[in-house]
């Protein structure tokens, strides 16, 4: 036999139980999640643009200031341009076909920069689909977080060939110029790495930063969201089981009272 006060005591104990641990409340705030997504999207957008602009511009090598030329010569991955200092007229000559023989530095830099462009482009597109402001899978927040994780991984991978190609090209240009200066060899023109190479480095570093934000921080968001969903499910399950206990407690007493009433009526 259960006293009538016991169901009330059970409900009181359930309400007074300590709530699930909410240590990562700071990370789980929706405002911070949106902020990190937009910061990652900002860096991904400009990084992708820098990588593409770096690949298809012509100033990977530029003649040094101490040269005797009256024109500015720029060499890119695909063509070479000469700009007259006085009248500003620019003429460009494309390199031979891609199937022709080229220096190993040029071929590998082309391959790495094109790979970085493709990966960064797809990573940015995936990130746009994973943003909360985009109405794509609005009822699946965990899937959108996974999309952000995938885009972060792609951006991290895109930064590797980008930084490798641009830094390697810059180091090769610097070593070539330093060796000529060291041996007192002057060919009339000396080159240094130009702004296209700097764009490649900046775009690669931006991909690393954006990918780190999306992979590390969004992973914490995913873990926190999964934990909160599991805690909410457990709490609802506890309340439902408590409700069944209360129901099971009340039903026998009511049925017993009804049976007694019918028993009294039959006696009368």
Image (cartoon, rainbow, N blue to C red):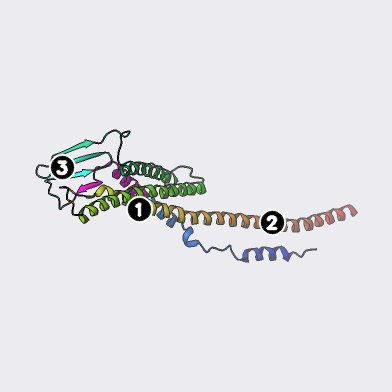
- Residue 90 pos. (x, y %): 16, 39
Query: According to the image, label 1 marks what residue?
Result: 205
For the point 18% across and 44% down, which residue is it? 73
Say whether residue 247 is left or right of residue 105.
right
Whether residue 42 is visible to the viewer of this picture, yes or no, is no
> Of the residues under marks 2 and 1, which one precedes in the sequence?
1
Of circles 2 and 3, the one toward us is 3
Q: Nearer the viewer, residue 225 or 183?
A: 183
Mark 1–mark 3 distance (CA, rounded to whole Å): 30 Å
- Residue 128 pos. (x, y %): 41, 45
Tell me the crowding category of disc 1: few under 14, some 14 to 19, or many 20 or more residues within 10 angstroms, Cα based: many
Residue 229, magenta (yes or no): no
* Disc number placed over residue 168 in the picture, else none: none
Mark 2–mark 3 distance (CA, rounded to whole Å): 81 Å
For the point 52% across and 57% down, which residue is it? 224
In the picture as drawn, the residue positioned furthest to the left comes out as: 86
Label 1–label 3 contact, CB within 8 A: no
- Residue 84 pos. (x, y %): 12, 42
Q: Nearer the viewer, residue 267 or 55?
A: 55
Of circles 1 and 3, the one toward us is 3
> Of the residues under marks 2 and 3, which one precedes in the sequence?
3
> Bounds of the magenta span?
43-64
Say whether residue 94 is left or right of residue 246.
left
* Disc number placed over residue 241 in the picture, else none: 2
* Disc number placed over residue 83 in the picture, else none: 3
Residue 48, magenta (yes or no): yes
Whether residue 141 is visible to the viewer of this picture, yes or no, is yes
Q: Secondary structure at mark 2?
A: helix
Q: Quadrant of the C terminus?
A: bottom right
């Amino acid at each position: 036999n259960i006293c009538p006060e016991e169901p009330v005591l059970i409900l009181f104990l359930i309400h007074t139980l300590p709530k699930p641990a909410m240590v990562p409340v700071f990370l789980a705030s929706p405002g911070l999640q949106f902020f990190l997504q937009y910061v990652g999207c900002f860096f991904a957008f400009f990084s992708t643009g820098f990588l593409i602009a770096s690949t298809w511009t012509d100033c990977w090598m530029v003649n040094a200031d101490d040269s005797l030329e009256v024109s500015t010569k720029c060499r890119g991955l695909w063509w070479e341009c000469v700009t007259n200092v006085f009248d500003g007229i620019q003429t460009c000559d494309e390199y031979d076909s891609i199937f022709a023989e080229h220096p190993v530095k040029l071929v590998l830099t082309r391959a790495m920069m094109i790979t970085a462009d493709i990966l960064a482009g797809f990573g940015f597109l995936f990130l746009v689909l994973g943003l909360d402001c985009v109405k794509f899978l609005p009822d699946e927040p965990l899937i959108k977080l996974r999309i952000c994780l995938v885009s972060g991984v792609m951006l991290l991978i895109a930064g590797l060939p980008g930084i490798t190609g641009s830094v390697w090209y810059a180091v090769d240009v610097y070593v070539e110029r330093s060796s000529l200066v060291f041996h007192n060899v002057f060919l009339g023109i000396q080159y240094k790495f130009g702004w296209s190479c700097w764009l490649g480095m900046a775009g690669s570093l931006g991909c690393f930063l954006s990918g780190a934000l999306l992979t590390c921080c969004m992973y914490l968001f995913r873990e926190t969201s999964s934990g909160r969903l599991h805690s909410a499910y457990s709490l609802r399950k506890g309340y439902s089981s408590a409700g069944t206990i209360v129901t099971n407690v009340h039903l026998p007493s009511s049925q017993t009272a009804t049976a007694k009433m019918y028993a009294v009526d039959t006696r009368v």
